[in-house]
Structure formats: C-alpha cells, structure tokens
Amino acid sequence: MHYHTQHPLEFTDVLNGLSIPMNCSTACASAASAAAEGADCVPCTETFDAMVPKLEDWFEWCAATRLNRAQWLLLATPRMGAFADSPERQRRLRRICRLANGFGLACGAVVPIADMQQHGWYMVNPLVERRPEEQAAAIRRRVDWIAAAGYDYLSTENGLSEFTHPDDELMLRLLNEFADYAADAHGLETSIKVHCSTGQLCERHADPRPGREGERLNFNFLPTHASPRLGVMPHSVQPFSLDDMAPVYGNRNFSDMLDYTVHEMREGRRQVIWYGESAYWVSVDIDVPLLLLAYGDRRVHDLRLLASLEYTDLGAPPYAGWVPGNRSTGARRQSGARALLHTPLHGQITFSSGWEWGYWANDLIAALGAWDPRSDAKDDEAALRSLLRDKLGAAFGPALGQRLGAWMARVAREQVEVYIYTAKHTSVEHAADAAAAGVPKAHDGYLPPGAEFELSRDEVAGIFHELDRNDDAQLRYREIKTGMASLRRAGVIDKRLWASELLAGADADDDDSVDEDEFWHMLSRSIPNPNPRRVPLSRTESDALFRQLDVGIAIFGRDNGRSSSMGASNPNPKDDADGGAVMDDLEGVEEEGGDENGNDDGDGEAFSSASKWKI
C-alpha cells in the first residue's frame, strides 16, 4: 500500500519522523525533542514516540488484508532545517521500518530524484548541482542514508513536477544512476511512478511502441529507455478507469497509459506494477470526504481488464475484445486463443489517501482485488459483491455480510452511472442509444445550462485567435487552460468546465489539439443528454440523499432508471441516524442466484487466487 503523505493525513507526520507540531514559537515538551526538532517549537500536541504505536493498527490491517508492502513519501521543508537528514530522523524511520517488518511487510521510501512539488525530499536540484558527478554524488548520498534507515526498497518520481521536466537525456542519466546504484551498493529494488499528465515530450528519445516508432516520446514514458533494474508503476488518477472517458490532465481517456502498460509487459525487461488511485477526486471530495464507493468499482474494473489482457494474445492495438467504455470487462469478453504475455503484471500498489469517512472501503476493495480480481464474474458488480462477501461476513456474520456486500456493490454501480457515465456516455451501449436517436457524435453539451448560443462564427474566430498564443492555428491544453477566463467572461461555456474537458470535447481528430473548425463546432452545439432515462434530482431529493449518505446507510432505489431517495419508504430519519432501520433496509436488497462470482452455472467453484497480484 502507498500511503500518500503529500496529503494532510492521519500518519503524515509520524511516517516522516516528526512530532505534531514542530518548529513554532516556544519551548518543546522535552529537551530531547527540542534537540532533535529545533529549540523554537511549541509543546507537541503529539510526540513521535506517542504516535508510533498507532502505526501498528495500519500494519496489522495490511497483513490481515494480505498486503505485503507499505510505502510512503519522505518529505522535507526549509523549516525542518538540519533535522531532514539528521541521525535522529534516520533513527526514527528505522524504528518504523522494523515495526512494519515485524508484521511481514516490506517498507518502501518514495524519494523524488528532482521532483520539487509538494515538499518532496528530492535528491538533486539540477539548477544547483549542474555537473554530472555532483548529481551522481547527491543521489548516492540520499540512497545511502535511506538504506541505513532500514527501508527494503525505493520508489521515485519523474521530472521536476507533474507538469515540468528537465532535458530528457539528463533525466535518463539520473534514473539510471538511481536504479543501478541502489541495486549494486545495497541490493535494493527500485521503481518509478509513470504519471498520466500530458503536454510534455522528449527531445532526444523516440517512442518505441509498435506503430509509433520515431514519434516524440511522452516524457512520462521515458523510463522505458532506462535501466531494466528500474520498475515502472503506470498511474491513473481519480476514479476513472483505464477505459473510461477521463478528462483530466489534458487526457480524453487513459488508453495511452493502458497501451504503455501492455507494451512494458510485452517487452518483459522490467517489473510492471499497476498503480491506480483509490481516493482523492480532486474537485469532488477534496474539501468534504465522501462515501465514493465508485472508486472501488473502478479499481476492480481495471484489475479485471489488466488480468484479461495479461492472458490474451492481443495483437496490435486496439486489443481484441477491448472497447473504450465497456463496463463489463472480464475474460469472457476476449475471444480466440488465450496466451500468456511474455511478462505478466507483477502486482498492484494500493493508493491510499487516509481513512476519512468511507475511504477505508475503497482501500479494502483494491487490496482484495489485487489477489484475485474475479475475472470470470459476469460483470464488475458481481465481482465486487464476491470480493466483499467473505470479509464482511467475517465481521458481521454470513447473512448480513452478504447483504452488505450486495448493497455496497449496488451503491458503487449507481455512483459510477451517475457521477461518471451520466455526463460522459462513453460506453458502447450509450453510443448505440445516441445513434438510434439520431444524435450526432459530438460532446455532451458544454454551454451554460439554459443558455442559447449567440456568438457568430467571426466572434468565435476572434476568441480562438485570442487563445492561440503560439499563432500556429492549433489550441493545446496549456493555451486553453490559460484562456478559460476569457471564455467564461464571454458566457460561452459553463463556469464549471475544465480546460481538459473542453479539449476532450472539441478534439474530434484525436491529435491532442483543437483547430478553429473543431472549436467552432464544439461551441455552436448543445447536444441533449443522450440518455433520456436519467432525470436530475430536485434539491429536496438531493438533500435527502445526502442525509442518508451522511449516516452511511443509504439504499439506492430505482424509479424509471433514476436513483431515488429513501424519504418515501422511510419517513422517520431518526431510524436512519441511530441505525435502527439498517436491518429493515438491507432486507430489501435483492440477492442474486448463481455462484460467488455471479455466474449462473451453479457449479459454485471458487476461482484460485493469482499470487502474482500481491504487491
């Protein structure tokens, strides 16, 4: 499990060897902490020593869920001063690693090479350490320090941030120094996150993938040219699956990340570890944590997709049987002979952003799916229901555990339908519905609600040229993002529209840019929702639904294809608040027949766990 300490989480401080708070204004609670953390700090709310025992709960949970690794980002700020690389901090981190090892967990440190964002404890500043020998020495010092702190493996980041990078030849040299020195000097395994951001291309290294030879390589994919000792961790963000429409970081979807992942698996030169997020939907739950079980659904979906591709003779992309947006991924969708790829996926890192509200459930689902994603279940909901049944049954008893699992799987499916597919409609089913209704293939309508398009072609051309700062008749993500304020002031777009969504909606020829014609056609249309069954909730219904989610026992009903609130069936909100109506509500959950994976063959056979899905 990756515990993302760049977020302000429960264990961010203790996992970095810190007390809470430090480096403030008055004397510390003890002379020892004052000496370690600086003389000018307030009495600690919680000392490091007091917080360490709480880590046992996390490590025990990891072991009980059959996870075998725990990793986190090491951070540093100017206020930490000499404490950042002090022997005292090293001693504290060694204590944590020994505690984790006692639970059978390998400890990993995530240490950026040159990535400077969000207080990452980067090894090299290329603007200061300019000579290759200085950069190599800085990397070696940091690797030596972390190895002495007791870590079992290392992970790192690419570039200077998620959106900026140095020269690709320089970065490749740093990656190789990191991976080779860690292996040769300390016998440590290394890996690197492969981010999904766009708009960064290598100058000197070409894309090696079939059909793309000679094209400039996405900088995030530069590790494909690195030492084979450096493993890769392809990373998606937010709840979107590998074959959903994903209008984030300048993407239309994550198909390029899927293509890269399978390419590395085919090459078989390095470890390939899947690394999807199971929490933190930036614009949705950053302020108020929500019970978003859709994350668990999407992580199971991705694991089932990757498992099916792993054992299929794919041929050239697009892969046989894979259609973007198909939400019933599984081995049954694949046709023809099945053949094991040269190198299967080595495992999954579960991305955790703490345990606010229902986040624990998504961590649990992702962890369970890593061992056996239930590839032969008839659909994602059946797979999720099967994964949850045993764990919940152990906690609440078999009967209630089965009903709770069915309820959670159904809520997850409803959320995927409402939050992801209602607006985007990327599945083949919705595409067929739209075609039958005569709806042209275009975006889903980005005009402000109720607004009429009033700008002329000349006025749109004026806006286009205002945004086209490179004066090359093409708008790319950065230009669109910079010019969004002009579009909003003109009243042309919804104020909630992101630049990545505009690019995804307008880029009809999939070249990651928008020309004037595409820009005009996007802004001059307001395509009605191609799913007429979906009716927006009223404010009253929305408030009632929120109250039910807030106590964690909402049951989603069906009413003409729409999620309906519980208000009509349960008029007494106090019953929900104190849990008195939970059993009654769960009695209404339909239990499907068939075996544990939702199959109708009645043979009841359990599918064997694939031990490779273990990281």
Image (cartoon, grey):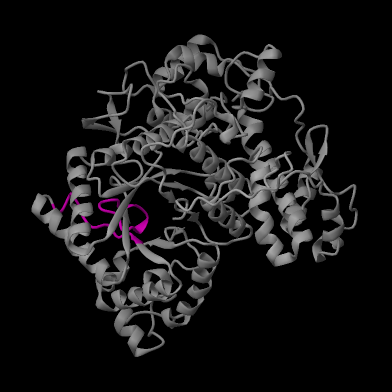
Please say whether residue 176 is one of the residues in the magenta stretch. no
Is 190 rendered above or below residue 331? Answer: below
Q: Position of residue 101 (x, y in %)?
A: 40, 72
Left or right: where 558 falls relative to 69: right
Q: Position of residue 503 (x, y in %)?
A: 47, 26
Q: In this orientation, which residue lies closer to the viewer: 102 or 552?
A: 102
Is 304 rendered above or below residue 146? Answer: above
Q: Quadrant of the C terminus?
A: bottom left
- What secondary structure prevails in the magenta region? loop
Q: Position of residue 65 (x, y in %)?
A: 55, 62
List the single residue furthest toward the bottom.
31
Please indicate, yes or no, whether residue 279 appears anywhere in the rendered image: no
Left or right: where 146 falls relative to 349: left
Residue 327 picture quarter: top right
Q: Which residues are magenta?
A: 109-129
Please indicate, yes or no, whether residue 31 appears anywhere in the rendered image: yes
Q: Residue at x 32, y 61 (%)?
A: 153
Is 227 rendered above or below residue 355? Answer: above
Q: In this orientation, which residue lies closer to the viewer: 5 or 94?
A: 94
Q: Residue at x 38, y 31 (%)?
A: 478
Please say whether residue 111 is one of the residues in the magenta stretch. yes
Left or right: where 118 falls relative to 182: right
Q: Position of residue 436 (x, y in %)?
A: 70, 13
Is 295 rendered above or below residue 363? Answer: above
Q: Residue at x 47, y 82 (%)?
A: 50
Residue 12 picture quarter: bottom left
Numbered marks: total: 0
